[in-house]
Image (tube, rainbow, N blue to C red):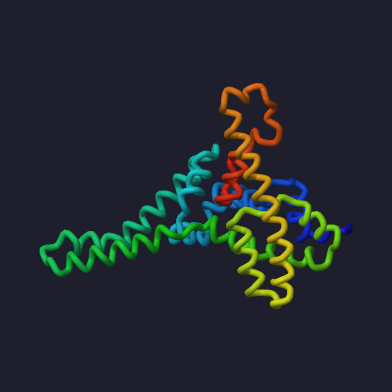
């Protein structure tokens, strides 16, 4: 197999043999972009303008806070706060005014605006855009590389989030015949994967019965983090 640069991350994730190859790719990209936004980019005006406007979701804020670099996060958090103050002050001023009708409409408008500005994330946007390329690469490999297709058929499949996302992406970007053939292979893999994982979690639970204390853990010792990954698309480290 001659690797093309775009296929390497997909092949590497497949060889990891985890519960979801796309979660592995996504996790690596998250770490890459968290590092990017905690690096020298924090001093670039165009990057700061973007993070002022979009901010980060709670998950990626937590990742950045867990990192060793605190000053870059402090700088971007400060200018994000200043950006929000500038845009929210008009709502605050209206709400504390004496005009009751103005208070009511401003409160509703402010809630809508806050929901809008807190539902964006610079890291999520970067990751989502790149994931489209990897979804396409996966389909390309599945169609054209028999070795890759067999590897997938023998794999643990995907988390439920990426399983649905792959079907939706294929329906949008591929022909009906390709989508149906892909869905068939994916369904076969996923059915076996969920049955295997369910057995592992059951065995994990049974191990807490005193009668099973001496039994070996087998493949069930890490069943819970793998189940969480499969069910939610989150990798538990």
Q: Is residue 96 above or below residue 34?
A: below
Residue 5 locus on image (x, y percent): 79, 59
Task: Judge from the rendering whether residue 146 lies leftward or rightward of residue 220; answer left or right.
Answer: right
Q: Is residue 205 above or below residue 50?
A: above
Would you say 144 lies left or right of 137 here? Answer: right
* Along the viewing direction, whichever of 1 and 30 lies nearer the viewer: 1
Vertical position of residue 157 compared to residue 237: above or below? below
Report the front residue among 122 and 181.
181
Q: Quadrant of residue 223?
A: top right
Can you say which quadrant of the picture contains the N terminus? Answer: bottom right
Residue sitting at 58 percent across and 61 percent down?
A: 128
**Furthest-left residue in view?**
98
- Indicate left or right for 52 with 16 as reference: left
122 or 14, which is in the foreground? 14
Residue at image location 70% in from the left, 36% down from the top: 219
The residue under the point 60% across, 44% down is: 227
Q: In which quadrant of the rendered image does the C terminus lie?
A: top right
Residue 75 percent coordinates (x, y): 45, 48
The mark total stands at 0
Residue at image point 47% right, 53% down: 57
Residue 66 rendering spot, x and y as whole percentages? 52, 39
Extreme residue in the right direction: 1
């Amino acid at each position: 197999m001659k690797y093309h640069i775009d296929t390497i991350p997909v092949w590497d994730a497949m060889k990891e043999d985890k519960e979801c190859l796309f979660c592995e790719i996504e996790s690596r990209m998250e770490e890459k972009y968290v590092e990017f936004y905690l690096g020298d980019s924090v001093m670039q005006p165009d990057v700061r303008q973007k993070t002022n406007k979009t901010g980060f979701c709670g998950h990626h804020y937590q990742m950045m806070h867990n990192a060793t670099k605190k000053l870059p996060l402090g700088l971007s958090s400060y200018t994000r706060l200043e950006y929000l103050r500038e845009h929210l002050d008009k709502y605050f001023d209206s709400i504390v005014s004496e005009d009751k009708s103005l208070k009511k409409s401003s409160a509703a408008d402010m809630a809508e605006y806050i929901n809008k500005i807190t539902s964006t994330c610079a890291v999520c946007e970067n990751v989502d855009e790149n994931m489209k390329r990897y979804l396409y690469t996966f389909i390309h490999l599945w169609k054209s590389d028999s070795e890759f297709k067999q590897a997938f058929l023998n794999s643990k499949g995907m988390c439920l989030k990426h399983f649905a996302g792959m079907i939706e992406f294929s329906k949008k970007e591929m022909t009906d015949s390709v989508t149906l053939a892909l869905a068939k292979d994916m369904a076969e893999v996923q059915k076996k994967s969920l049955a295997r994982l369910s057995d592992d979690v059951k065995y994990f639970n049974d191990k807490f019965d005193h009668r099973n204390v001496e039994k070996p853990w087998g493949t069930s010792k890490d069943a819970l983090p793998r189940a969480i990954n499969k069910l939610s698309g989150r990798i538990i480290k």
